[in-house]
Amino acid sequence: MLKYFSQFIFVSVVLISCQKQENAVETIQYPNQDAPLALLMRDMFLDLEQIKEEITDGNKIKSYLKKHQELLTAKPTDPKVKTEQFNTMGMAYLANLRALEESSEEALLDNYKSVVSTCLACHTSYCPGPVKRINLLKLD
């Protein structure tokens, strides 16, 4: 009887230990979860990665302006973020994106750098978490 009790205790400890390890492995990759603005910002990053690749490969870039304009109306995680300064920076980003999309081949790289700089300026003021990731968009 003592043998079965010991085995039961051992199995229980192993199961509990495994369960705790499984939960410990979980990390929060996106702290802002599913707020529409957070989701849009993640898509915007992927779009800019695509633009970076197209510029690097010498290909024509496609337009993302209509999609990215939603940043002015998308609901943020924290409603206090939508200030006049946020809107001003959002408009500057969209103006730089429009200039990029309408760029001549000669101005493409400089206009892309302006778009990335606008992202960095805003995120330095509002949500610094993605700055490290945005820096990956830079082209020299």
Image (cartoon, rainbow, N blue to C red):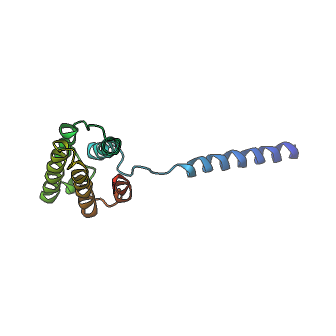
Residue 125 on image: x %, y %: 24, 63
Question: Of residues 60 and 96, which is closer to you in this image?
Answer: 60
Quarter of the image with the N terminus is top right
Quarter of the image with the C terminus is bottom left
Question: Of residues 92 and 101, which is closer to you in this image?
Answer: 101
Residue 139 on image: x %, y %: 33, 54
Residue extending furthest toward the front: 106
Q: What is the count of numbered marks?
A: 0
Query: Looking at the image, is 136 positioned above or below residue 44?
Result: below
Residue 113 on image: x %, y %: 26, 55
Residue 94 on image: x %, y %: 16, 48
Question: Of residues 47 and 59, which is closer to you in this image?
Answer: 59
* Residue at x 24%, y 36% (from the top left corner): 62
Q: Is residue 13 left or right of residue 83?
A: right
* Residue at x 17%, y 42% (from the top left corner): 69
Residue extending furthest toward the bottom: 125
